[in-house]
Amino acid sequence: MKTLMIDISRRYAPIAATLLIALLCGSAAFAGTIESCALGNGPSGTNTVFPVNCTGDTSGTLEAWTSSAFTYTSTAGTTSGFVYSAVYDDGGTMDFYYQVVNSSGSATSIAQLSAFDFVGFTTNAAFITNGGGLTGTGFENGTVAPQLTNVESGTTVNFDFNTPLESGVVAPGEASDVVIISTNAKNYTLGGDSVQDGGSSGTLAAFQPSSAVPEPTTLGLLGLGLIGLASLRRRRFSR
């Protein structure tokens, strides 16, 4: 019996070693791209979806990044902060990233972020919690996940932070997780987004999908965004 066991162990040891190596290396294989993570999640038409958590998936190649400061006044007072926007080439198609940062002195929380114009393109909603790991941008690790996402009038993609749970708002001093719209667009151009809750920021600079080749001014925003990173990080301490 002892001889038999030794013979079995010798014969199958290489197979066991191969399986062990595959198991150890397989963890990296489970991590895919943002596009593959969000694929088929929607929203499209008039449906509403739960954005999928794609933290840990790869983001592709950074194409451009920008930051827009906002200030608006409602009956409760003045609300201010930043909306960060970026676009990534994820294997030949464009993914659009956004994050809301609410200043600590704001009078109200922020309930919704709206991004436009996505008409004519597929939209799949996702988010990541580790925005601070996106090099070359000003994104940070957020604390507030989007709860629902829908398409309005076939063109505007809304991320709701307080629906259906009212406690999900981006309170003063907080940052949302980085929300993502994965598309089938081959190119991008200048576009806009906005945030609101009791008031509205109006249209802020951002990016949107395009069927055309990126304009020179759009490409230049990447350089401007990188130059402004240092000053942006300094201003965060004053929130």
Image (spheres, rainbow, N blue to C red):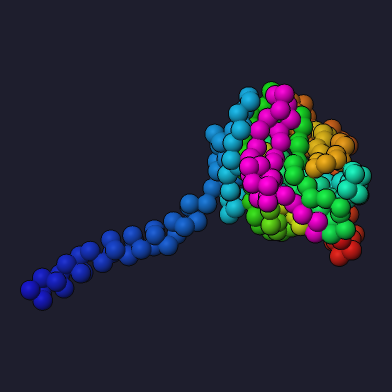
Q: Residue at x 76, y 29 (%)?
A: 117
Q: Residue at x 85, y 40 (%)?
A: 199
User: Vertically, is 59 above or below 192?
Assistant: below
Residue 173 picture quarter: bottom right
Give x and y (percent) for residue 190: 83, 34
Q: Nearer the viewer, residue 36 or 124?
A: 124
Residue 180 picture quarter: top right
User: Vertically, is 45 above or below 34?
Assistant: above
Residue 186 appears in the figure: no
Q: Residue at x 16, y 73 (%)?
A: 6
Q: Residue at x 10, y 74 (%)?
A: 3
Which residue in the rendered view is the most extreme toward the left? Answer: 1
Q: Nearer the viewer, residue 193 or 10?
A: 193
Horizontally, residue 35 falls left or right of residue 231, namely: left
The magenta stretch is 145-173
Q: Give the number of callouts.
A: 0
